[in-house]
Amino acid sequence: MRNIDDLMTPEELAYDLFKGLTDYELNINTRWLKDVFRALRVGGIWGWPEAKRTFRKVSSVHFVEIHYEEE
């Protein structure tokens, strides 16, 4: 497993994941992702299966994307 060094706030990650949605849908999904973020402890992992992406909460304000390297 390796971390990608690009720190993202929940708002930045929501835009990255949901940028194809209308502004209204983006706002709803951003609020939802902020709730997910709030529920995680630092070090907690959250995944988006449809996008095949996984993220770790690395501070009180940032996610970082992680990748699992195949052996």
Image (cartoon, rainbow, N blue to C red):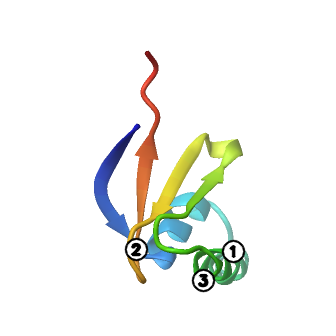
Tell me, yes or no, whether the two marked residues, 2 and 3, touch with CB atoms within 8 Å: no
Q: Which residue is mark 1?
A: 29
Work out whether mark 3 precedes mark 1 in sequence or the reverse, and give the earlier one: 1
In the image, is 61 to the left or to the right of 39? left
Q: Quadrant of the C terminus?
A: top left
Q: CA distance from mark 1 to mark 2?
A: 17 Å
Q: Residues within 10 Å of mark 3 (few under 14, many from 20)?
A: some
Residue 33 place in picture, x, y as percent? 64, 74
Quarter of the image where one finds residue 6: bottom left
Q: Residue at x 42, y 27 (%)?
A: 69
Q: Which residue is mark 3?
A: 38
Where disc 1 sits, the SS reads helix
Q: Amino acid at mark 1?
A: Asn
Which one is in front in this view, the residue at disc 1 or the one at disc 2? 2
Q: Quadrant of the N terminus?
A: top left
- Give the numbered dot on residue 62: 2
Q: Residue at x 50, y 75 (%)?
A: 10
Q: Amino acid at mark 2?
A: His
Work out whether mark 2 precedes mark 3 in sequence or the reverse, and give the earlier one: 3
